[in-house]
Amino acid sequence: MSKKFWDEKFETMNESGMKAFQLEKLKETVAWVYDRVPFYKNAFDERGVKPSDLQKLEDIAKFPFTVKTALRDNYPFGLCAVPISDVVRVHASSGTTGKPITGPYTAEDLDQWTDCMARGLWAQEVRPDSILQNAYGMGLFTGGLGFLQGAMRIQCAVVPSGAGMTERQIMLIQDFGTTALCCTPSYCLTIIEKAEKMGVDLKKTNLKTGHFGAEPWTVEMRSEIEARSGIHAYEHYGLTELMGPGVSFTCEHYKIHINEDHVLPEIVDPGTLDPVELGEEGELVFTSLQRRAMPMIRYRTRDICTLRREKCECGRTLVTMDKILGRSDDMMIISGVNVFPSQVETCLMEFEQVEPLYQIRLGKKGYIDHITVEIEVKSAMYQAGQGKLDELAKSISHRIQQVIGINVPIVILPQDTIERSIGKAKRIIDER
């Protein structure tokens, strides 16, 4: 009988045991960066704290935050705590503006990252007899090689198909008997749409699970993927700054468990930056616990969510995080109202006539910010005539206004107008 957990000791550890382990590793990490990284020594000294001030987990609140600009200012290896001779791999962010965020790894870092990925994939039904098709891009982006490493640790058959060439992806799913698909959720939808146009029923293939990350997606989009493909759609969350994917993962009950033996999570008020209680919404902050090449101390992710410590039916005791509501730096302020793309997507997915493809276009009317949402609809709806399309647009606009409190015009575009994604989908077009 197959084991239920990849690493039962940590996945089911009680809260007191986990906190004791975290404190031990946190003390090591804080001392490690203070002694080896001038940026952190200066930041700690300016804040008036020393590693010895960390006596309990709550003391982490005394220490300064790390933000993305610190990584760019110290590009490429200014925050590295080991000599380059100890670095065995370097990844970088997939961002397209400015210098990328770098992520150097020691051999030990890579081993830990691989184990975190294996832990998540194992929780998501991947086993040694699985055939896993990895349709993430292979390269500097952490996703592709992260999933590859985790699958190899489990020792299942891996098909490193890479991103793109969608018809070939479908052919491989059919011919190789793929059981698990790894890619961004938006690219999975592209694959599903292409398969439907080719007359291929993915429900009649061996495909059972999808393992998605690298971009925010809603519960409604998960339901759409599952309904159209017949798979279980699982989530992985991570950041280049911390390790890549592997920070957290969904179990079979879709609870997102954080690998809290490797990263210490906090939620802070994005305005005051004060810690908030479990169950309260705020900005997610992480501190590395075991990383050696480039540990992050209180890294502000800008992701808005909630942490919970509740018993999960899967048996794991790891703290859980809610799905990301949005990012504090992706938040749009329209007519004084805070708007997240995920709120718009949730509303759109309530309408079965709408394809899970959309763009939020931001512009100005005079001095006032203006928002428009562009969508595509299913073929039968598009052919129903302009009157029906106008009615649908009005209904969707009304629903969005109910949720976020402002009028958002809906533009229904001709089919195949919105660019299909092979990686992260571009949701916001800012023309202001």
Image (spheres, grey):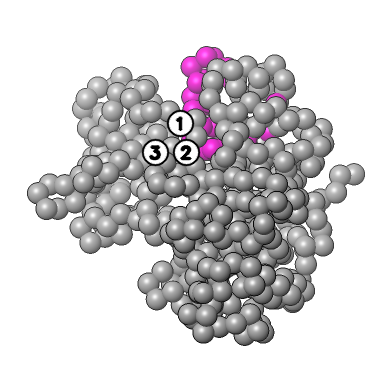
* Crowding near the residue tagged with mark 3, few <14, some 14–19, many ≥20 C-alpha atoms within 10 Å: some
Work out which residue is located at the far right of the displayed protein and give it. 1
| Quarter residue 349 falls in | top left
Amino acid on which disc 1 is placed: Ser
Q: Which residues are magenta?
A: 178-201
Residue 118 % position (x, y): 74, 46
Residue closer to the observer: 8 or 26: 26
Residue 113 % position (x, y): 70, 51
The answer, for residue 28, to whether it is visible in the render is yes
Instruction: Judge whether residue 179 is colored magenta.
Output: yes
The answer, for residue 233, to whether it is visible in the render is no
Q: CA distance from mark 2 to mark 3?
A: 6 Å
Q: Residue at x 48, y 80 (%)?
A: 46
Q: Is residue 112 above or below residue 1?
A: below
Residue, disc 1 = 421
Q: Are marks 3 and 1 in contact (CB under 8 Å)?
A: yes
| Quarter residue 199 falls in | top right
Q: CA distance from mark 1 to mark 2?
A: 7 Å
Residue, disc 3 = 426
Q: Which mark is residue 424?
A: 2
Residue closer to the observer: 101 or 200: 101
Residue 326 % position (x, y): 42, 55
| Left or right of residue 418, residue 295 in this image | right
Q: Are marks 2 and 3 in contact (CB under 8 Å)?
A: yes
Task: Identify the secondary structure beneath mark 1.
Answer: loop
Q: Residue at x 66, y 36 (%)?
A: 209
Task: Identify the secondary structure beneath mark 3.
Answer: loop
Q: CA distance from mark 3 to mark 1?
A: 8 Å
